[in-house]
Amino acid sequence: QVQLVESGGGLVQPGGSLRLSCAASGIILSSTYVGWYRQGAGKQREWVASITSDSRLYYVNSGKGRFTISRNNAENTVYLQMDSLKPEDTAVYFCSAKTPGREYWGQGTQVTVSS
């Protein structure tokens, strides 16, 4: 049974930082395409960042220079370091892991950027 568990969200002031974690069981993240997505209130889910099995990194334009995706193979966890956070980054953040024919999702973690 595949499980993805996000953590690390919370309330942070503008300009602050958070590190989100996506811990997996039942699947080896280093063998999959892992993405972070977010969904703000009343908005569609949008892609934020990805890391491929061969460690190529991709970012949404609004996250370049502020967000860093990384993977710890020993911990089977993917991280999203978010710096210089802005109120518009407020959303529920989800991670997903894609295998041929199937995509798995976590339950999400809330990030609120507010003074």
Image (cartoon, grey):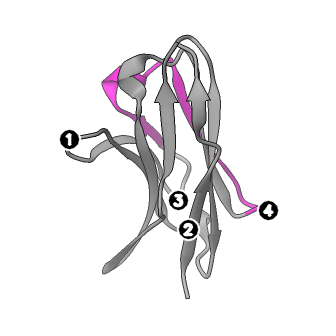
> Dot 2: within a 10 Å radius of its alpha carbon, few (fewer than 14), some, or many (20 or more) residues?
many
**Alpha-carbon span between mark 2 and mark 4:** 16 Å
Query: Against 61, is 38 above or below?
Result: below
Q: Please give the residue where the numbered disc 2 appears in the rendered image.
A: 4
The amino acid at mark 3 is Ser
**Residue at (61%, 82%) from the top-left corner?**
26
Q: Disc 2 or 4, which lies upstream in sequence?
A: 2
Magenta span contains residue 64:
yes
**Alpha-carbon span between mark 4 and mark 1:** 37 Å
Q: Please give the residue where the numbered disc 4 appears in the rendered image.
A: 74
Res. 25 visible in picture: yes
Q: Please give the residue where the numbered disc 1 appears in the rendered image.
A: 42
Looking at the rendering, the stretch of residues picked out in magenta corresponds to: 57-75
The amino acid at mark 1 is Gly
In this view, the residue in front, 93 or 2, is: 93
Find numbered disc 4 in the image and state the secondary structure of the residue it sits on: loop
Q: Quadrant of residue 11?
A: top right
Q: Position of residue 10 (x, y in %)?
A: 59, 36
Q: Please give the residue where the numbered disc 3 appears in the rendered image.
A: 53
**Residue at (56%, 48%) from the top-left corner?**
55
Of circles 4 and 1, which is in front?
A: 1
